[in-house]
Image (cartoon, coloured by chain):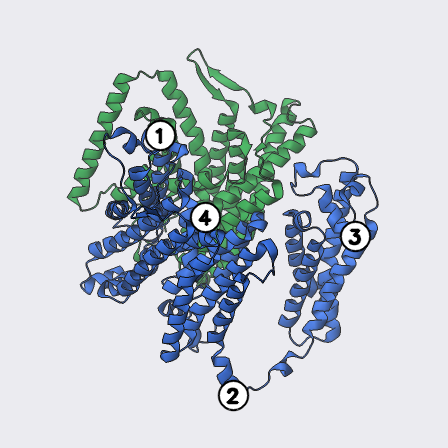
Chain colours: A green, B blue
């Protein structure tokens, strides 16, 4: 599994041997282009509209990317879909909610810019911490006993854990939606000149902090000793163990990394949607997993690419195809299916060996 | 000191469990019974911990169980004390913890909600709470010291032969108990009688399946099978409406489970979007027959189809959907297949939800007509149960014959290794498509029954959790095992319907059971024999246990 291992990168785009699929792809693209052309000639969207949609897509992409990292990290090492990852994110979102509500009673969220900014950063950290605990407990209880089991077994355990976490949160914190208190510093926005393009500070915050966090992740995976151990475990657990890598520790560390990112994403999701519910993590989690698969699962740059493409497609796609915006999920899953048909390992995916496919 | 440390870890775990039960509102729901639930948890836990740590001296064991009891109960008491103080000073704790209302605190301290708000001292109540919980734990430690080894007596041959008839007698006894509940003179459980009847039936079905597994081929088995079958056929006539309705639901899921079992269990193709075919079946019959549907309102002269015409149409449409999904995903394997099928299932639901003009959108399709035989409506739960039973018998027969046929063996071969299977002359394309097609047909069939049972269907009935439920039920039952599907459907679909009174807790309970089951018995309750051998392959061979390398 190539975690940024340069020797294994396969950047070339190959569509496989089948000429039929190539013909199918060409026909499909032509049909899509025809449809988009038709829609655009009938409905005149302004450049401002497209810019706004693109910005939305980038914000959404940043969120998906953070969650997708967790999926891809765990998949890269354990070859397992961590179905409960979305719930780990939701738990982070809830922790962030309680932190922000606490800061509001202290008067920080609407206080001086420093206090307001501090409350955002602290809420993010609280969310990351809560998710970290949830993620590590999840690994310890639901996944570690199943390390050597057939592949369906941990998947079912993950599904069980996902429902367990959702309904636990429902029971403990109640069914009512929890509305985020947006700190003053990120509640307004920025108008770009007189183009009418408006960027909310929340969006900017989400985009740049997700980029920052992913940069940190990249540095950890590619530069640190633990990162090297992770890459080696991803290649082969047996040989890494023989080389003196503590495999259990590496796996816990991987879960911790993914969960911390998911926690940050949870708080950002809360700020973005202004509401958190017990099932708020499920669908974004599935979307993020979709993004990871589109990019090529087990591959960090792939997850990033997949997440941003998915975010942008979801934001721009419905209007470009002349469909109501409820179809964005249909578009996302159709893109997933198409990518997997024409390039089964994802956009940046390596050629999987038999055991891993 | 070492006793203290050895008791600390279990104490923390049991504290987490008690805290969890407390926060999800056991005391609020069950009143002071919750204290005894906590006591039972502590008793069991300290019993198990003591039994596991063999060979420790009695004093050590009792001290350990004291720690296991004392620390969690003190923690719980402290927490309750803090909550009580907050509630006395009018702080709304439920803004964070939704279940911590004054009656919750009251239930743990033996007061009433008003007394808690008035600020009455909770300390005496908490003291007795700590006392009860700690003594339960110590009791567990003491009981664990009893000499159990001496209880194991050597059975004589006579008792042995008596024991071997037990699997046959238990189901009979259960069914008799169920029958006796039906007698007009028996008033055991009052209004809860039908629920207890259903529970007895569930255990009867489960015990019968285990008995069929346990007893060897022969006259006894054949006659038992006939008796059990007759009993099953008499059930719809004996049941009341509620019982029949619940059982009908279970049987619909059995049909679906058998279908998914072909796809996942036999052919090894992990399908997370199985609900798509269920939806195709339900909607195709509903749209062709309901007076509410777009087709009936806009096609002049079309009066709608009957159930007997709608069923084959739904099956054919399901078949087409199965093949349409099958073709693009032929090349995918494992987790990729899982995620694509998941996407497909969601696409179907979203299309049903958003294609408002034709499918009714979130409003669904209302008034699906029941089947008729010569103007006699079969819309009652009893008739639908009979119909479902008949169809499920056909489906089971097909599935068994498929499993033991050439196709079934090619599915298994393909599941184990595609390349070897191909080398042995198996046509992968047609074998995979057949698996998808059979799965889709069975799901579509059960979808049609579901539409009839529900009368009104909505896109939300066909969400992802149905797929996951069906997958979970075949795994609980034992993947690849047909009897397992029945057990799984009873456990995952039937039991929750009965346990409606503790509705809030059923999903967490089943989710936790799913996780625990995967760790303890991954092959399921009634595993297929082949699968059981695979999962325990390493255990029979006498390989010395090495430190497991993670995989």
Residue occupied by mark 2: B158
Q: Is residue B142 above or below residue B516?
A: below
Which badge, 3 or 1, is on the more N-terminal residue? 3
Judged by depth in the image, the label closer to the viewer, 2 or 1, is: 2
Give how far apart the Cα atoms at labels 4 and 3 are: 41 Å
Q: Is residue B391 above or below residue B166?
A: above
Q: Are marks 2 and 1 in contact (CB under 8 Å)?
A: no
Q: Between residue A225 and residue A47, name the one nearer to us.
A: A47
Residue occupied by mark 4: A83
Q: Is B118 left or right of A92, judged from the image as shown?
A: right
At x 75%, y 73%, the residue is B59
The answer, for residue A77, to whether it is visible in the render is no
Q: Which mark is residue B126?
A: 3
Give the class, few, some or many, for how many residues have Cα within 10 Å of label 1's Cα (few <14, many ≥20): some
Give how far apart the Cα atoms at labels 3 and 1 are: 58 Å
Determine whether the residue tagged by mark 2 lies in a helix, strand or loop.
Answer: helix
Give how far apart the Cα atoms at labels 2 and 3 are: 54 Å
């Amino acid at each position: 599994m190539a975690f940024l291992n340069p020797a294994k990168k396969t950047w070339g785009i190959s569509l496989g041997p089948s000429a039929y699929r190539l013909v199918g792809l060409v026909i499909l693209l032509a049909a899509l282009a025809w449809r988009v052309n038709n829609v655009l000639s009938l409905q005149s969207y302004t450049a401002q509209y497209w810019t706004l949609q693109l910005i939305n897509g980038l914000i959404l992409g940043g969120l998906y990317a953070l969650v997708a990292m967790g999926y891809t990290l765990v998949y890269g090492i354990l070859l397992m879909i961590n179905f409960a990852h979305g719930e780990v994110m939701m738990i982070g979102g809830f922790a962030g909610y309680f932190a922000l509500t606490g800061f509001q009673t202290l008067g920080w969220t609407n206080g001086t810019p420093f206090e307001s900014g501090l409350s955002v950063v602290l809420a993010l950290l609280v969310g990351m911490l809560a998710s970290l605990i949830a993620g590590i407990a999840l690994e310890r209880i639901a996944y570690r006993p199943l390390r050597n089991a057939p592949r369906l077994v941990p998947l079912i355990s993950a599904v069980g854990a996902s429902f367990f976490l959702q309904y636990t949160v429902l029971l403990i914190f109640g069914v009512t939606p929890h509305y985020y208190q947006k700190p003053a510093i990120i509640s307004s926005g920025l108008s770009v000149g007189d183009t009418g393009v408006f960027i909310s500070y929340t969006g900017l915050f989400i985009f740049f902090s997700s980029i920052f966090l992913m940069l940190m992740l990249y540095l950890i995976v590619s530069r640190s000793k633990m990162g090297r151990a992770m890459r080696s475990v991803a290649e082969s657990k047996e040989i890494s163990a023989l080389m003196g890598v503590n495999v259990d520790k590496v796996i816990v560390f991987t879960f911790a990394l993914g969960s911390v990112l998911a926690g940050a994403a949870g708080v950002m999701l809360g700020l973005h949607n202004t509401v958190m519910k017990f099932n708020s993590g499920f669908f974004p989690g599935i979307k993020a997993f979709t993004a990871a698969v589109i990019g090529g699962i087990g591959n960090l740059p792939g997850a990033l690419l997949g997440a941003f493409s998915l975010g942008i497609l979801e934001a721009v796609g419905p209007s470009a195809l002349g469909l109501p915006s409820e179809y964005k999920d249909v578009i996302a899953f159709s893109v997933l299916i198409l990518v997997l048909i024409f390039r089964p390992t994802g956009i940046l995916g390596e050629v999987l060996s038999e055991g891993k496919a | 000191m070492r006793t203290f440390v050895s008791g600390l870890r279990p104490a923390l775990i049991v504290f987490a469990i008690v805290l969890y039960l407390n926060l999800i509102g056991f005391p609020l729901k069950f009143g002071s019974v919750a204290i005894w639930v906590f006591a039972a948890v502590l008793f069991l836990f300290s019993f198990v911990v003591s039994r596991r740590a063999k060979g420790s001296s009695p004093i050590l064991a009792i001290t350990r169980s004291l720690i296991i009891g004392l620390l969690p109960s003190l923690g719980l008491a402290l927490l309750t004390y803090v909550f009580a103080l907050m509630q006395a000073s009018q702080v709304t704790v439920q803004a964070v913890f939704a279940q911590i209302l004054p009656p919750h605190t009251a239930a743990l301290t033996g007061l009433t909600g008003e007394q808690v708000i008035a600020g009455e001292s909770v300390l005496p109540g908490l003291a007795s709470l700590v006392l009860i919980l700690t003594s339960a734990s110590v009791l567990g430690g003491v009981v664990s010291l009893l000499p159990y080894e001496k209880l194991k007596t050597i059975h004589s041959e006579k008792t042995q032969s008596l024991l071997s008839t037990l699997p046959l007698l238990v189901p009979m006894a259960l069914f008799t108990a169920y029958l006796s509940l039906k007698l007009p003179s028996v008033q055991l459980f009052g209004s809860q009688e039908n629920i207890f009847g259903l529970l007895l039936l569930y255990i009867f079905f489960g015990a019968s399946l285990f008995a069929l597994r346990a007893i060897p081929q022969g006259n006894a088995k054949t006659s038992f099978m006939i008796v059990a079958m007759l009993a099953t056929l008499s059930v719809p006539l004996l049941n009341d409406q509620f019982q029949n309705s619940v059982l009908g639901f279970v049987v619909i899921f059995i049909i679906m489970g058998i279908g998914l079992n072909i796809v996942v269990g036999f052919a090894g193709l992990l399908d997370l979007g199985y609900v798509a075919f269920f939806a195709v079946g339900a909607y195709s019959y509903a749209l062709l027959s309901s007076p509410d549907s777009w087709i009936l309102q806009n096609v002049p002269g079309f009066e709608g189809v009957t159930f007997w015409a709608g069923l084959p149409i739904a099956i054919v449409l399901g078949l087409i959907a199965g093949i349409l999904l099958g073709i693009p995903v032929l090349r995918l394997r494992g987790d990729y297949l899982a995620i694509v099928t998941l996407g497909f299932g969601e696409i179907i639901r979203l299309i049903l939800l958003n294609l408002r003009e034709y499918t009714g959108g979130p409003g669904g399709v209302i008034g699906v007509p029941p089947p008729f035989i010569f103007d006699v409506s079969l819309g009652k739960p009893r008739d639908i149960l009979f119909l479902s039973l008949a169809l499920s018998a056909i489906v089971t027969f097909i599935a068994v014959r498929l499993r033991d046929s050439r196709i079934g063996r090619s599915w298994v071969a393909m599941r184990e290794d595609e390349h070897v299977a191909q080398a042995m002359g198996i046509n992968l394309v047609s074998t995979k498509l057949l698996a998808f097609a059979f799965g889709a047909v069975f799901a579509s069939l059960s979808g049609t029954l579901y539409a009839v049972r529900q009368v009104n269907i909505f896109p939300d009935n066909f969400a992802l959790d149905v797929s996951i439920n069906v997958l979970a039920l075949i795994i609980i039952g034992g993947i690849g095992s047909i009897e397992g599907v029945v057990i799984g459907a009873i456990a995952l679909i039937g039991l929750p319907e009965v346990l409606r009174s503790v509705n809030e807790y059923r999903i967490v309970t089943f989710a936790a059971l799913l996780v625990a089951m995967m760790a303890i018995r991954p092959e399921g309750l009634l595993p297929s024999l082949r699968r059981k051998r695979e999962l325990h392959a390493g255990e029979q061979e006498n390989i010395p246990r090495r430190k497991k390398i993670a995989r």
